[in-house]
Image (tube, rainbow, N blue to C red):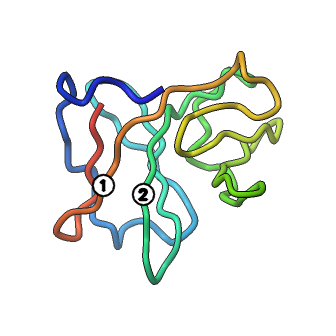
Amino acid sequence: MHRDLQLERWTAVCLLSDIVPDTGVCALLNGHQVAVFRVGADEPRVFAIDNYDPNSQAAVLSRGLVGSIGERIVVASPIYKQHFDLQSGECLEAPAQSVASYPARIDGGQVWVAA
């Protein structure tokens, strides 16, 4: 569900060191809550999806548990435990309840998200 990069504006969210490895934080981008995750410590990667969990109707995904199911890196919602793919935003248990994903990158020690 990545959006068109040409229409997106990259925004510095925080320092990479502000996010504990294998956890997430919430950022407010253009009035919209985005969950930003750091995966890995030695060779970190970052991902961004909507923070709003449509299953529980609460803005909680940034507080979920990061892990993997097969080759997919996921976050488990802290309320009902549905798993969301951090690259695509797909809800594995209920694909109709998937969320948007956003391009994210690390540059100069900063985490950047296009939203």
Q: Is residue 14 left or right of residue 2?
A: left
Instruction: Say which element carries label 2.
Output: strand
Q: Position of residue 43 (x, y in %)?
A: 43, 77
Name the quarter where the C terminus is drawn. Answer: top left
Kindly identify the amino acid type of the residue bearing the numbered disc 2. Answer: Val
Which residue shows up at 50% across the image and 27% down it?
Answer: 100
Q: Position of residue 26 (x, y in %)?
A: 45, 44
Q: Is residue 93 left or right of residue 3?
A: right
Up the image or down, 96 lies above or below 70; here it is above
Up the image or down, 82 lies above or below 110; here it is above
Label ID, residue 79: none
Which residue shows up at 83% across the image and 36% down it?
Answer: 80
Label ID, residue 105: 1
Quarter holding residue 86:
top right
Q: Nearer the viewer, residue 63 or 39?
A: 39
Kindly identify the amino acid type of the residue bearing the numbered disc 1. Answer: Arg
Residue bearing mark 2: 46
Q: Position of residue 107 (x, y in %)?
A: 20, 63
Q: Are marks 1 and 2 in contact (CB under 8 Å)?
A: yes
Q: Position of residue 64 (x, y in %)?
A: 66, 50
Whichever of callouts 1 and 2 sits on the residue coming sooner in the sequence is: 2
- CA neighbours of label 2 inside 10 A, class few (<14), some (14 to 19), many (20+): many
Q: Nearer the viewer, residue 16 or 40?
A: 40
Q: Is residue 18 left or right of residue 35?
A: left
Quarter holding residue 73:
bottom right
Quarter holding residue 109:
bottom left
